[in-house]
Amino acid sequence: MNATEALLESWDRQCRIIDNLVGLITPDLLNAKPDPNGWTIGFHLAHLHSTRRYWHMNAAGLEAPVGPSLYTVTGSGESESDYIPSSDLAEIRSRLADSAALVRNWTEEQINADAQKVGNYDHPVFYLQHMLWHEGWHAGLIVLALRLAGHEPPEEQECALIWDQWRLPD
């Protein structure tokens, strides 16, 4: 595997981790939080999808994000409380798969075209690294929310769903 393939595979693995976490969530757990003042799991997942779409729009120089949101906007949309995340786990999984492909395919196109500066990133690789870092941060908060709700996966399952995604099989 060359460096570009490895980079894109790292994105695929991170997206698989997010999908694995969604697979642990039941509708009632969408309201679990990592902190009493923090976001719900549902809000974290909708935010991941929105972030992928927003920064793709920015990097690609588009006027609007690609694809539908996972939020229903109420009120003026100026307050976080105006954003209601979807509670439909099938829709969440589908939208996350769509935005994962959007990020991956666009990054691959830019690297193959030998693009340099994209949006406010020095290089498409920095764009993808931003996405990876962001997703890992939210994955940790989702696991913490599951823990605090009494649904943390056992260590063996956590390894299979998260950490083993980065390693070669034994």
Image (cartoon, helix red, strand yellow):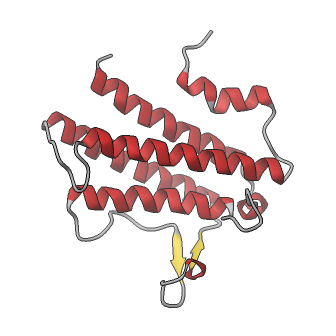
Q: Is residue 78 above or below residue 55?
A: below
- Residue 133 location (% of width, % of height): 47, 43
Which one is nearer the viewer's eye here, 93 or 42?
A: 42
- Residue 146 location (% of width, % of height): 77, 49
Which one is nearer the viewer's eye here, 116 or 17?
A: 116
Q: Find residue 34 and report its image quarter.
A: bottom right
In this rendering, would 127 be left or right of 119?
right
- Residue 87 location (% of width, % of height): 65, 66
Q: Residue at x 66, y 65 (%)?
A: 39
Which one is nearer the viewer's eye here, 84 or 35?
A: 35
Q: Quadrant of the C terminus?
A: top right
Q: Residue at x 53, y 77 (%)?
A: 72
List the single residue furthest toward the top: 170
Q: Residue at x 61, y 64 (%)?
A: 43
Total marks shown come to 0
- Residue 100 location (% of width, % of height): 42, 47
Q: Quadrant of the N terminus?
A: top left
List the single residue furthest toward the right: 150
Q: Is residue 118 above or below residue 20?
A: below
In this rendering, would 152 be left or right of 53?
right
Q: Residue at x 13, y 38 (%)?
A: 113
Q: Is residue 86 above or below residue 162?
A: below
Q: Find residue 128 and report its image quarter.
A: top left
In this rendering, would 4 be left or right of 27?
left
Which one is nearer the viewer's eye here, 25 or 3?
A: 3
